[in-house]
Amino acid sequence: MTTRSGQQAVEEQLRQLRDSSTIAYREIEQVLPQIRAHGDDATLAWIAACRRLYDYDREAGKAFIHGSREAERVSETVAPWTAQALQFTRWRGAWRALEGFMANLPRAYGSLGHAGERRWAEIGFVWCERQVDSGCAYFTTPVVDLSGRQGITGIEQLTQPAEELFETRKLLLATYLAGGIRVRNLLGAQAILPWALRGADIMQSGRARGEAYFRLESEESLALLLDQLPGFRLADRNRLLYMLLDVWYGHGFELKEGSWSPEKGRPFVETDGRSVYFPAVMPNRDEAVLAALHAAGHMRFGTFDRLAMEALFRLAGAEFPEAGPVSWAPLYARYGDDALRFQLIFDLCEDLRVDFRVQQLVPNYLQRMLATARSGARHPETGVYYGLAVTSIEQALAASRNDGVRDERFAPLLEPSATVADAWRIATAIYAADGLPPVTDLEAFHAAYLPGRGPNTTRLAHPQQDQDEQRQQTRSGAEGEKRPQDGGEESSETPQNAESGDERDGGKRQEMAGFGESSGASTRASGRSDEQRRDAGSSDKGIAYPEWDYREQRYKRNWSWVQERKLAESNITETNRLMNQYAVALKRLKKAIQAQKPTRMAPQLRQLDGEDMDLNAVVSYVVERHAGRSPKPAIYKRREMRQREIAVTLLADMSTSIMQHLPEGGGRLVDRVRAGVLLFAESMDEVGDAYSIAGFCSKYRDNVSYYTIKGFEQPLSQDVRSQIGGISGRLATRMGAAIRHATACFEGIESRRRLLLILSDGRPEDYDDGGDRRYLHEDTRMAVKEAVARGVHPFCITVDTMANQYLPQIFGRGHYLVLDHINSLPNKLPEIYFRLRR
């Protein structure tokens, strides 16, 4: 409400301000009309805040005044954010945080609302109180980045782990906020805490190394991200991709792992005319296969043909180098700021030309491309380009069926004699005739490409002298790659050792032979190692296994020793008591099993469509085509439900901690463990799947006890039930050695799928770990990787409420479960198994 006395007070304040600072008065005068609309009280408070902030710091006062106009317009208030701005005067040197606060204030009101803005400000003030630099990092980060487009919930998801990290490790928000946002966006909010804990450990060993980790600039932080990223891992499937390309194109291609990392945006397969470069991970299998076929198609169908490239450069008015690799940049130079728009059109035309030729070799290629493209999301800025690319695929598919081409612009590209120069010519015409929107944002530029496609000119090109000659060179290169190393230096192009943890080994081989090759090689080497261990198993110390030392980045040979023992304790009385206590749950569980017997997915071969290639059918199809016949393109396989073939080991942690008493008179933890194991055994006996039960504990590295309670071939007898009733806790938890031994016990078990269920109540620890918790964590993580490489899939079930801090690093996201309440263990354990075997 405006009154005469209020107006006089405002004028008096302005006079005083004009006398003390003419510059401040002029700046305030420009914003004042908007502020006056909110009444004299709000105006007086705002002017007082301007003066106080100007006295506190000249830059702070300027930032407040300059930001007030937009803040008032969006919030339609003045008093709340004026009071918030004055909070910054509590801390010395906080003007930069205030500057960020005022810059972000309109977006905070606009995207979070008034209540959300208050919470956003409160969180920032807490960090300013702790450290001004952390408060500054928080307030200068755009609100949209902080929230991840999830409102105030996203901000709280990001900052809640920061509270725990500050309390336990004194890790400040400024250290890892930028990297934490990227980790959250890539892997989800649950990944922030384990990622940051890992960084805190690294920071202790060296500040520069830790800061590089948190900026996601070090090899170890990028390796961790790549290891956790969801999707289809091409590095694990390069042999399959090589065979597919060899079958379809009649020769092999040199496959190399590219330099893609998560911060570079959308992953895609690239080629330079000599090799095919694939990223570590792609969204799904279909996109990965389509991308490999498409990239190799550019090499197979003349994108890098020297004569065609020379014609292309002449059309573009650019000079073509006489020798060496060729840069594509001169082609786009004349387009200046509009280069991205023309590149999209040119890539679309050349991709269409190549994809139509690929369809002639690979049946259903365009159908699969079209189905994948139609399910993709379109970016608001470049959706029209995406739509044009989908239309071009539809045109090519119609032409392949002799239905004609409705868009005559694309018709020349579907001629057998078309070259990359023709693609340039048609792209130039489309660019000149169509009013396609400009493209300025790199993210929008990448989003305009169809799944399986990407920019074609990201690498220097190696022109092909002659396709037959090039084919011979790539084949000989691939054969050379497959030849075993004879003691020379490893190729720098070899993918990072899958077993090397989070740091590269600088080209040195691991002490353990066999790790770091393909899965098959790893399995064979591991198998030989097991035979050697069993030959040496007569030692009183038991069976020797290696152990991974992350500090030295190597395996220690024969470091941990496992002794197989029979569990001496048995208690049939306890078993009978548990059977009576859980009789209702067991009856319900058996009824559910009988209603839906376990099944497995069995392949149906030689199908016209399906989820994967039938390689034998593909070979037959290609041979018959070369023989001049017209074979039916039944080259796919799909799966149908049939009886399963599965083997599972339940490995129970028998450390001392399972003897603890539960709160509120809930009995002991060991009682729940016994009940869970017993119901699991009874359920498995009903199902008929092959299974074994074991327990483990340890005291030092040379004394790891492995108790075989039930073997795979052993029936569920009274003796086995009695041993389950006698399970008790003892000693410590050297989990890595137990996992390696359980994995070795699967040798000789014929099954399509092998599961290792690990039941634990705490983190891997032992008496001789020197207080370095990370040591056994890292060894267990490597043991899990070794198991996966040998076809065994570990899954951990834990009752440790703090397990989310370490299990994601050890087992990976989606491969563990933390039970909310220990009482649910007996019922949950069988249910978890049935869910995993689907």
Image: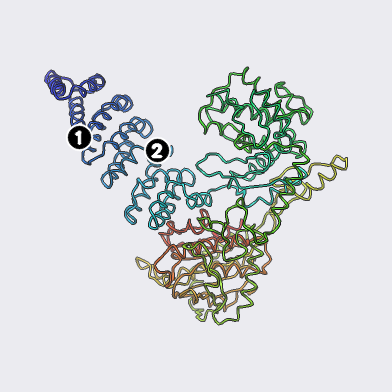
Q: Residue at x 29, y 36 (%)?
A: 96
| Mark whose residue sits in front, 2 or 1 | 1
Taking 443 as reference, is 228 above or below it?
A: below
User: Residue 462, located in which quarter of the rendered image?
Assistant: top right
**Which residue is at the front of the view, 277 or 12?**
277
Q: Residue at x 60, y 76 (%)?
A: 717
Describe the element under mark 1 as helix, strand or loop: helix
User: Rounded to the nearest whole Å, what is the CA distance between mark 2 and mark 1?
Assistant: 32 Å
Under mark 1, the amino acid is Tyr
Taking 659 as reference, is 272 above or below it?
A: above
Q: Which residue is mark 1?
A: 56
Describe the element under mark 2 as helix, strand or loop: helix
Taking 252 as reference, is 699 above or below it?
A: below
> Which mark is on residue 122?
none
User: Residue 334, located in which quarter of the rendered image?
Assistant: top right
Tell me where residue 801 appears, x and y as whole percent. Answer: 41, 59
Answer left or right for 2 relative to 234.
left
Q: Which residue is mark 2?
A: 151
Answer left or right for 200 relative to 742.
left
